[in-house]
Image: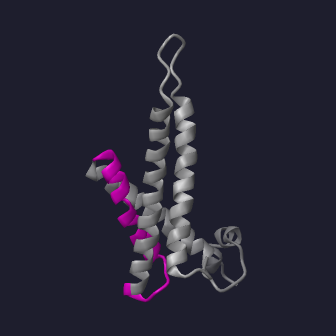
Amino acid sequence: MDSLNPGQKVALFTSAGAFGGAAIGSVESVWRIPRLGQELPSFAKQLRGIGARSVAFGSASFVFAASEHFAHSIRSHDDVWNPFIGGLVTGIVPAVVKQNVVWGLGAGVAIGTGMAVLHYFESGDDKTSPLEKWANRYDYLKKD
């Protein structure tokens, strides 16, 4: 991911989010099949559900990638705070979708924390895998 310029990274995140949202929306539309004897939902209604999830996930991915790059350009540091700030700003999307500010704040903190932890375990100059970093996270406490 480091080889991508910011525009490519934003485009990649947005398209991946939209694709993932469409996949989740299609699964949710299949789950909403009514009981026997009830009226079947129209195909247009199912497409609206798929499109709504695709737009929500695509916009969340766009907001995250853009705000992470903006935080990086303002702070001029590549550390765990940039993804955390990006995740906090991404909380705007669930707040708009659910029309609840508290929901958005909680989602922003959760997304920011998750992305900061992910960034911490995947970054570094050494060639250790994130799993090895996780397994050796307390090695500094050992006495030689």
**Quarter in which the N terminus is drawn:** bottom right
Q: Which residue does the image show at 58% across and 46% down from the upper left?
A: 23
Q: Residue furthest top?
A: 37
Write the residue at 72% across / 81% down.
127
Q: Residue at x 47, y 62 (%)?
A: 61
Where does residue 109 sit, x and y in percent of width and height? 39, 61
The answer to whether residue 139 is left or right of residue 90 is right
- Magenta segment's dominant SS is helix
| Colour basis | one colour
Magenta segment range? 74-99
Residue 53, given in percent of the width and then of the height, sits at: 47, 47
**Residue at position x 47%, y 58% in the image:** 58
- Location of residue 120 with respect to 88 vertically, above or below: below
Q: Is residue 6 above or below residue 25?
A: below
Q: Is residue 35 magenta?
A: no
Q: Is residue 71 left or right of residue 27?
A: left
